Amino acid sequence: MPEQKGREIIDIIANYLEKGKEKILKTTYIGKLKIDIASLTRKRDKLFIELGEKVFLLKSKGVIRHSEIDEICERIDNLNKIIREKTEAIADLEEKKEDQK
């Protein structure tokens, strides 16, 4: 009788350990899949950026024309102009700062 109780306790503990092991393996696999998805998403995003840059270049060269693309490229051109102006403003300010020394 005591041996049977001991075996039952051991079986219960073994069952809990097995379930815990399965849960850990499942959680680990899910984590790996999430990391894979994040990596693939980053690669895809980089390709979208590369595609956008190529489309912008081809549009700038007059190779492609499309009203939606033209509108987006115009917005990019406007942003580039603002960036250039702000960069020049920084350079001017830094030059004046150097002159004052």
Image (cartoon, rainbow, N blue to C red):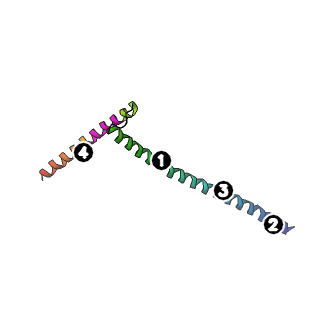
Q: What residue range appears in magenta?
A: 73-83
Label 1–label 2 contact, CB within 8 A: no
Which of 20 and 54 lies nearest the eye of the viewer? 54
The disc, 2 or 4, on the residue closer to the chain's N-terminal end is 2
Q: Is residue 14 left or right of residue 43?
A: right
Element type at marker 1? helix
Q: Position of residue 35 (x, y in %)?
A: 53, 53
Residue that numbered label 2 is attached to: 7
Residue that numbered label 1 is attached to: 44
Q: At label 4, which amino acid type do we have? A: Thr
Say few, some or many: other residues with alpha carbon within 10 Å of mark 1 (under 14 / 14 to 19 / 20 or more).
Answer: few
Between the residue at mark 3 and the residue at mark 2, the CA separation in whole angstroms equals: 24 Å
Label 1–label 4 contact, CB within 8 A: no
Element type at marker 2? helix
The disc, 1 or 3, on the residue closer to the chain's N-terminal end is 3
Q: Which mark is residue 22?
A: none
